[in-house]
Image (cartoon, rainbow, N blue to C red):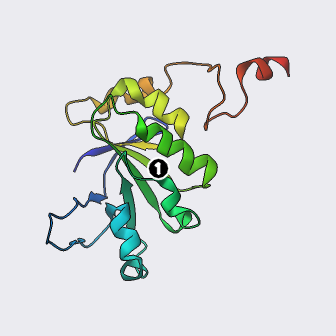
């Protein structure tokens, strides 16, 4: 199982299985145990998952977070896929889920997640990270806290530095 990095830099085994989108004409097969299904398929079959507290969803960059408006906190975990490191749409999805839709549970970055992105993902509201397989999870703690102060307000601190210094 791949490793998951938490905000404190600790490394954990990933209990959650990401369920790939089925090919055309195939049905969604959800395994036993914790699973992440595509958000649109969860919405389409929500009644089938009502008795399972171990089902979360994952977003692609083109998925809209408002599809979960009013439903976000029914989910124990939401993951956002970064298909390549240069695709920044996942940062916006994370901020919207946290700030506009009030998601309080675990928000995970999956896909092409690199060490140098962790600090910025944390600022957008992610609290767990599935690093790309070729990256060293032992270096994650340093990368999560690379900067001691941030100038701008963000999900992790809504007061900009000039206001923090003034008080």
Q: Residue at x 30, y 37 (%)?
A: 131
Can see residue 113?
yes
The answer to which of 146 and 46 lies nearer the viewer is 46
Decide: is 160 above or below 18.
above
Q: Residue at x 37, y 74 (%)?
A: 44
Q: Quadrant of the C terminus?
A: top right
Residue 162 position in % (x across, y down):
76, 17
Examine the image and state in which quarter residue 84 appears: top left
Can see residue 126?
no
Q: Is residue 159 left or right of residue 29?
A: right
Q: Residues within 10 Å of mark 1 (few under 14, many from 20)?
A: many
Decide: is 83 above or below 100.
above
Residue 139 position in % (x across, y down):
35, 25
Decide: is 54 above or below 137.
below
Residue 97 position in % (x across, y down):
54, 51
Q: Is residue 72 left or right of residue 133?
A: right
The answer to which of 109 and 59 lies nearer the viewer is 59
Disc 1 secondary structure class? strand
User: Which residue does the numbered mark 1 point to in the structure image?
Assistant: 107
């Amino acid at each position: 199982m791949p490793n998951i990095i938490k905000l404190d830099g600790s490394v954990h085994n990933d209990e959650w299985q990401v369920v790939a989108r089925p090919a055309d004409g195939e049905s969604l097969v959800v395994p036993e145990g914790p699973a992440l299904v595509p958000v649109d398929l969860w919405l389409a079959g929500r009644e089938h998952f009502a008795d399972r507290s171990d089902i979360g969803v994952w977003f692609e960059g083109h998925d809209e977070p408002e599809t979960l408006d009013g439903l976000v906190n029914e989910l124990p975990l939401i993951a956002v896929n970064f298909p390549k490191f240069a695709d920044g749409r996942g940062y916006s999805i994370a901020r919207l889920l946290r700030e506009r839709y009030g998601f309080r549970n675990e928000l995970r970055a999956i896909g092409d997640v690199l060490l140098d992105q962790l600090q910025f993902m944390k600022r957008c509201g992610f609290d767990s990270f599935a690093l790309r397989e070729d990256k060293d999870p032992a270096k994650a703690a340093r990368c999560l806290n690379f900067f001691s102060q941030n100038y701008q307000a963000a999900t992790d601190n809504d007061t900009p530095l000039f206001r923090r210094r003034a008080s």
